[in-house]
Image (spheres, rainbow, N blue to C red):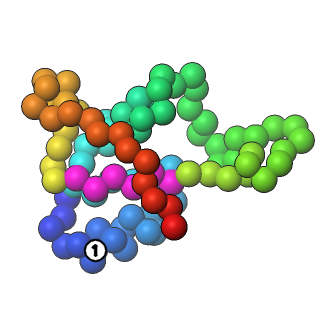
Amino acid sequence: LTEDADAAKRFLASVDSACVFHNASSRFADGFRFGLGAEVGISTSRIHARGPVGVEGLLTTKWKLYGNGQTAKDFSSGNEVFLHESLDLD
């Protein structure tokens, strides 16, 4: 947890992980909570493709979550609701 936006920005950029969080519970690391639907598995390797692979198979995603101290309980109790929306990637 930090109130220092610059420190959080450096942290989020430097952590080599699929998910990195600023002022939010790590319990948000869940496919459903990311708007991806139910998980069928979780890869723990850096590149998870096998066999012949095209460019799409070599891409990985880094999820950055910015919060204000929220926990998973806030959402399971109904005090907060998930908002899944497409982001402009340009």
Q: Can residue 73 be seen in this view?
A: no
The boundaries of the magenta stretch are: 62-67
Task: Please provide percent x and percent y for residue 35.
Answer: 42, 35
Q: In which quarter of the image is residue 72?
A: top left
Please indicate whether residue 40 sits to the left or right of residue 58 in the image. Answer: left
Residue 78 against residue 67 in the figure, above or below? above
Task: Please provide percent x and percent y for residue 4.
Answer: 19, 73
- Look at label 1 and name its amino acid: Ala
Task: Please provide percent x and percent y for residue 21.
Answer: 33, 53
**Viewer-closest of 59 and 46:** 59
Residue at 34% from the left image edge and 52% from the top image edge: 65
User: Which residue sits furthest right?
Assistant: 52
Is residue 66 found inside the magenta-colored segment of the image? yes
Please indicate whether residue 33 sits to the left or right of residue 57 in the image. Answer: left
Secondary structure mostly seen in magenta is strand
Please indicate whether residue 8 sits to the left or right of residue 42 in the image. Answer: left
Residue at 20% from the left image edge and 33% from the top image edge: 81
Circle 1 sits in a helix, a strand or a loop, which is it? Answer: helix
Give the class, few, some or many, for how many residues have Cα within 10 Å of label 1's Cα (few <14, many ≥20). Answer: few
Q: In which quarter of the image is residue 49?
A: top right
Please indicate whether residue 43 sits to the left or right of residue 83 in the image. Answer: right
Quadrant in the picture for the N terminus: bottom left
Residue at 89% from the left image edge and 41% from the top image edge: 52
**Viewer-closest of 57 and 69:** 57
What residue did someone put label 1 on?
7
